[in-house]
Image (cartoon, rainbow, N blue to C red):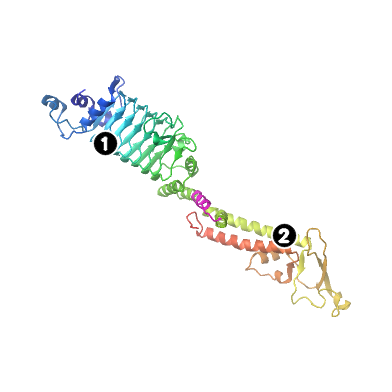
């Protein structure tokens, strides 16, 4: 087939013809080397406005005609490896329902647009470091049985993988086997938009989106329930950056991120940023919580890690600061229970103060006779625990303030409250006294954390 015949038969100028094939169109076999040569000749077209007929009449020494919209190659059976490395095609090329039994090499090349509608690639394709000034459309039943390498590519418009199938799983010894089990690798590729819908991985291979950068990420994650993605552990999202995406609930998107073998901080940060761009603040905060958990988990110092985890847990990582208030009230309840238990077990002792007659406080003595003792009330308490009996008797004035567990708890638990109970009573048991003191200090800590949570000091964005 000559270049003139090739262009006359397959060049199109009506964009509406793209993506549609007449059912009566017969299949055509062509050698990959012949197709590559025709495309290389066509890539040298520079003269615009010259018709195919004019070219044919003038002979092949005339310059080839310009292709305004591109080449449409329907139902080609391409045999052998198609080598188009380091080539510049100044026009779009559209393969429709074609079959390639060899490997396609298009690396370090450039083109205005490339489409493969319903095509089947037996051994894969390598487009590494290519520049496409337009769209790369691998859709409408596109099937790739070998690795698809799209690393370091620049696509000025859309990369569309709608309804594509990637069956490679790292076996077969095809060219580009450095994909290491990756059915599709988009590492470091840039595009204006990425369409990822109804994609399937029947071979169980990996999808690598490491350091991919797109402005818009259009997906069906919510609708497909992650069926458009490879299985758990086969997705790489580290550094995948997208400014906007199809809106979806955060729990679903987090399940998508969990498909990675190891969840990266960058994948969570990029998801949170995308939610912020959608003005979905609540979803962004939920994702930032997961990011904060991962960040705290990487703190090397054990004490610092446990402290940060406790602080942020108490305020629900800034989303539920009322949790700290519940913990605070629970601690007060425990304190109150201990105060009642101390009363029932006689672990409450009068505190030495000006109301107590020092002479008769411990009973009869040289300074305290029976007459003086008769004007006092007797109180017994047990300073010991764990079944050990060590009862102590003391004498206090009859008008001595009565012990009230509620009032005492309020005063002992809240440092700024003073009802006078602590002035007259104390815990006689050392263990209980220590527990009460510990609860008091913990309450101050939890209260401070609660204040930090409701004031916005402690949020998932907080450092350290």
Q: Would residue 379 be found to the left or right of residue 137 on screen? A: right
Residue at numbered disc 2: 338
Image coords of residue 288 (percent x, y): 48, 50
Residue closest to the far right: 370
Residue 336 part of the magenta-drawn span: no
Residue 295 part of the magenta-drawn span: yes
The residue nearer to you, when weighing 385 against 139, is 385
Image coords of residue 14 (percent x, y): 24, 30
Number of residue marks: 2
Res 360 seen here: yes
Res 161 seen here: no
Report the quarter where the N terminus lies: top left
Q: What element carries label 1?
A: loop
Image coords of residue 388 (percent x, y): 81, 60
Image coords of residue 214 (percent x, y): 36, 43
Q: What element carries label 2?
A: helix
Query: Eyeballing the image, is 340 above or below 282?
Result: below
* Residue span colored magenta: 289-301
Query: Eyeballing the image, is 251 above or below 391?
Result: above
* Quadrant housing residue 146: top left
Query: Eyeballing the image, is 293 above or below 442?
Result: above
* Quadrant housing residue 334: bottom right
Residue at numbered disc 1: 86
Does label 2 or label 1 sit earlier along the sequence? 1
Name the main secondary structure of what is drawn in magenta: helix
Q: How far apart are marks 2 and 1 (CA)?
A: 81 Å
Mark 2 surroundings: few (<14), some (14-19) or many (≥20) residues within 10 A: some
The residue nearer to you, when weighing 47 against 158, is 47
């Amino acid at each position: 087939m000559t270049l003139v015949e090739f262009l006359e038969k397959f060049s199109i100028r009506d964009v509406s013809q793209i993506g549609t094939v007449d059912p009566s169109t017969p299949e055509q076999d062509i050698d990959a080397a012949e197709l590559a040569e025709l495309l290389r000749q066509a890539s040298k077209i520079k003269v615009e406005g010259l018709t195919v007929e004019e070219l044919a009449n003038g002979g092949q020494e005339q310059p080839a005609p310009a292709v305004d919209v591109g080449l449409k190659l329907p139902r080609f059976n391409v045999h052998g490896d198609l080598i188009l490395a380091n080539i510049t095609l100044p026009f779009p090329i559209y393969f429709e329902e074609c079959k390639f039994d060899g490997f396609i090499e298009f690396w370090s090349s450039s083109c205005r647009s490339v489409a493969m509608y319903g095509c089947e690639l037996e051994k894969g394709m390598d487009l590494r470091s290519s520049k496409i000034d337009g769209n790369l459309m691998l859709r409408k039943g596109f099937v790739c049985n070998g690795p698809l390498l799209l690393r370091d590519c620049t696509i000025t418009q859309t990369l569309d993988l709608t309804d594509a199938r990637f069956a490679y799983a790292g076996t077969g010894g095809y060219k580009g086997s450095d994909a290491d089990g990756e059915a599709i690798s988009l590492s470091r590729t840039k595009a204006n938009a990425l369409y990822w819908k109804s994609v399937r991985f029947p071979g169980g291979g990996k999808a690598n989106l490491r350091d991919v950068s797109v402005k818009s990420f259009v997906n069906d994650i919510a609708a497909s329930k992650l069926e458009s993605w490879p299985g758990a552990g086969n997705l790489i999202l580290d550094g995948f950056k997208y400014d906007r995406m199809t809106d979806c609930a955060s729990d679903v998107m987090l399940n998508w991120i969990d498909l990675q073998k190891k969840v990266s901080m960058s994948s969570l940060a990029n998801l949170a940023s995308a939610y912020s761009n959608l003005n979905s603040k609540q979803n962004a905060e939920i994702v930032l919580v997961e990011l904060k958990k991962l960040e705290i988990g990487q703190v090397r110092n054990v004490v610092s890690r446990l402290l940060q985890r406790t602080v942020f847990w108490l305020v629900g990582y800034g989303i539920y600061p009322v949790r700290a208030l519940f913990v605070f009230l629970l601690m007060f309840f425990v304190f109150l229970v201990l105060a009642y238990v101390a009363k029932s077990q006689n672990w409450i002792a009068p505190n030495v103060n000006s109301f107590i007659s020092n002479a008769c406080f411990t009973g009869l003595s040289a300074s305290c006779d029976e007459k003086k003792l008769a004007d006092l009330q007797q109180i017994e308490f047990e300073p010991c625990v764990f079944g050990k009996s060590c009862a102590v008797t003391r004498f206090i004035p009859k008008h001595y303030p009565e012990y009230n567990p509620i009032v005492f708890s309020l005063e002992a638990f809240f440092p700024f409250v003073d009802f006078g109970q602590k002035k007259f009573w104390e815990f006689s048991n050392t263990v209980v006294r220590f527990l009460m003191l510990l609860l008091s200090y913990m309450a101050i800590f939890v209260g401070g954390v609660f204040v930090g949570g409701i004031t916005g000091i402690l949020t998932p964005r907080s450092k350290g």
